[in-house]
Each structure stands twice: as C-alpha cells, then as structure tokens.
C-alpha cells in the first residue's frame, strides 16, 4: 500500500534562512504528490503538486519541491523563510489501485520561523 | 469565486448528543470528501462522494456516523450519539474529478471544530 512519511514533526528556522521540509513516499506506480499548508484555524491550501510532468515543481509563495524517484522523496524547500510561513505542512500521495483511489496524508511538519 | 463553505465553525456538545455538520462545495465540483483531523495528525478520509454516490465509505464508523449528499451538491455529516473520542476537526473538501489516476487538487473548507464534553 502507498504511504507517506514526513521525517520531521517540527522544524525551526530563522527568518531569511532556507527552509527544508522532508517527505518520503512509497508507491507501486507513478504517484501524484502534493504539499498543502494549514495555518491555524484555516483550511488546507495547496502549495504545489507533482503529476508526472517536470520533476522540479514550483508553487506559491516561493516554495518548490523536487520529485526524486530514485530516492522516493518529495522534499519542500524555500530559499528564504518569512514569518508568515509559520504553519503546518502536509505531504500527500495519491493511492491508486483496484479502480479506486485515496489521498494519503503525512502526519505533518510544524514550521516555526524565528525573528 | 467562493471556496468550500462549512458550518458551524465550532460546536460544543455533551456526549451522547447528536451533531451535524454541513458542507457546500465549490460550484461545479463533482467530488466531495469528508475528513477527520485529530490534533497533531494529518486528515483521514471518512467518506468520498462522486456526484450523489458514496464511492468510498470504508473508514466511516457506520454505527454512529452517517452522511448524505442530496442532489450531488451540499453534504451533511452526522454523528449520533457523539462520544468523547469524536472531538476533532471535521474537514470538507471538493474537487473536479475527470477519472483515471488521481491528480486533481482538493480544495478544503476551514473545518468544523467539535468538542464533546
């Protein structure tokens, strides 16, 4: 079965420094992968998604992620953190089989940005 | 364009009482999802509708949870009776599904935060 692992439950960075949120997945086929962000008391918002086109995906607010099939990874990066980036981030993989599908969410990484 | 609308935003009830959540998806979206999100966890699917049909309800606790999506638009999720362990955030999402391998973006509402006392 497909699964997704977010390697860090909490990440702290200083404002202006790079952000790296790590995500590994397992899939028996060519998956779709997503990163969503959730600010407190808000719904989840799509940051970016990979759907078998370019392996380097650019998203909103300066975020990007690289799909690496050999490493089964889809890490999220941003060159320079902003205070407004503080939120919970979820990596998601689509699970397809037997004619049906699910979206499998990771357990989340809480990003803290220090002034 | 309006996003996914959920109500109420917050609900506090005593255990054994019934509760209902309402979701209005983005106009034109054929697929609607209900998720449960416990504190510190990622969302977990409860039920997925394609138009009016519940195509995946394998994770819905059917002894106390029920859902409906009349006319393939709005949806209601009900819990009766509620238990202490049902305290969580209930998220609704919608998407436009075209078939095949799932690649579509889900759009989420703000959620309903339920506290069962």
Image (tube, coloured by chain):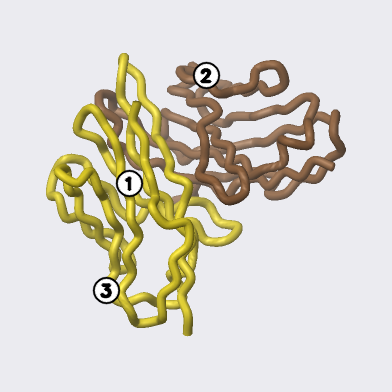
Chain colours: A yellow, B brown
- Seen at 46% across and 65% down, the residue is A111
Q: Position of residue B95 (x, y in %)?
A: 40, 36
- Seen at 16% across and 55% down, the residue is A56
Disc 1 residue crowd, few under 14, some 14–19, many 20+, Cα 10 Å: many
- Give the quarter of the image for residue B70: top right
Q: Position of residue A88 (x, y in %)?
A: 48, 58
- In the rendered structure, are the residues bearing label 2 and label 1 in contact, judged by CB atoms less than 8 Å apart? no
Label 1 – label 3 distance at C-alpha: 19 Å
- In the rendered structure, are the residues bearing label 1 and label 3 in contact, judged by CB atoms less than 8 Å apart? no
Q: Which residue is mark 2?
A: B58
Query: Foreground: B62 or A73?
Result: A73
- Seen at 41% across and 36% down, the residue is A104
Quarter of the image where the N terminus of chain A is located: top left
Name the secondary structure under disc 2.
loop
- Give the quarter of the image for residue B104: top left
Label 3 – label 2 distance at C-alpha: 41 Å
Q: Are marks 3 and 2 on the same chain?
A: no
Please give the chain letter of the residue carrying mark 1: A
Name the secondary structure under disc 3.
loop
Q: Are marks 2 and 1 on the same chain?
A: no
Query: Foreground: B96 or A53?
Result: A53
Q: Which residue is mark 1?
A: A34
Residue A38 to residue B103: above or below: below
- Seen at 41% across and 34% down, the residue is B28
């Amino acid at each position: 079965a497909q699964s997704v692992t977010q390697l860090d439950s909490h990440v702290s960075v200083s404002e202006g420094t790079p952000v790296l949120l790590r995500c590994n997945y397992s899939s028996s086929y060519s998956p779709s992968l997503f990163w969503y962000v959730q600010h407190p008391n808000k719904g989840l918002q799509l940051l970016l998604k990979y759907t078998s086109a370019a392996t380097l995906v650019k998203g909103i607010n300066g975020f990007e992620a690289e799909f690496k099939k050999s490493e089964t990874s889809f890490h999220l990066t941003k060159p320079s953190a902003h205070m407004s980036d503080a939120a919970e981030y979820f990596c998601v993989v689509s699970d397809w089989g037997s004619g049906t599908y699910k979206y499998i969410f990771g357990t989340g990484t809480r990003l803290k940005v220090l002034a | 364009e309006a996003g996914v609308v959920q109500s109420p935003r917050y609900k506090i009830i005593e255990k054994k009482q019934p509760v209902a959540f309402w979701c209005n998806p983005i106009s034109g979206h054929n697929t609607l999802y209900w998720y449960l999100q416990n504190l510190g966890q990622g969302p977990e699917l409860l039920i997925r509708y394609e138009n009016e049909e519940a195509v995946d309800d394998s994770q819905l606790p059917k002894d106390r949870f029920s859902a409906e999506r009349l006319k393939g638009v709005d949806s209601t999720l009900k819990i009766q009776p509620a238990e202490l362990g049902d305290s969580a955030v209930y998220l609704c999402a919608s998407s436009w599904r075209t078939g095949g391998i799932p690649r579509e973006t889900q759009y989420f509402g703000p959620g309903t935060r339920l506290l069962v006392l």
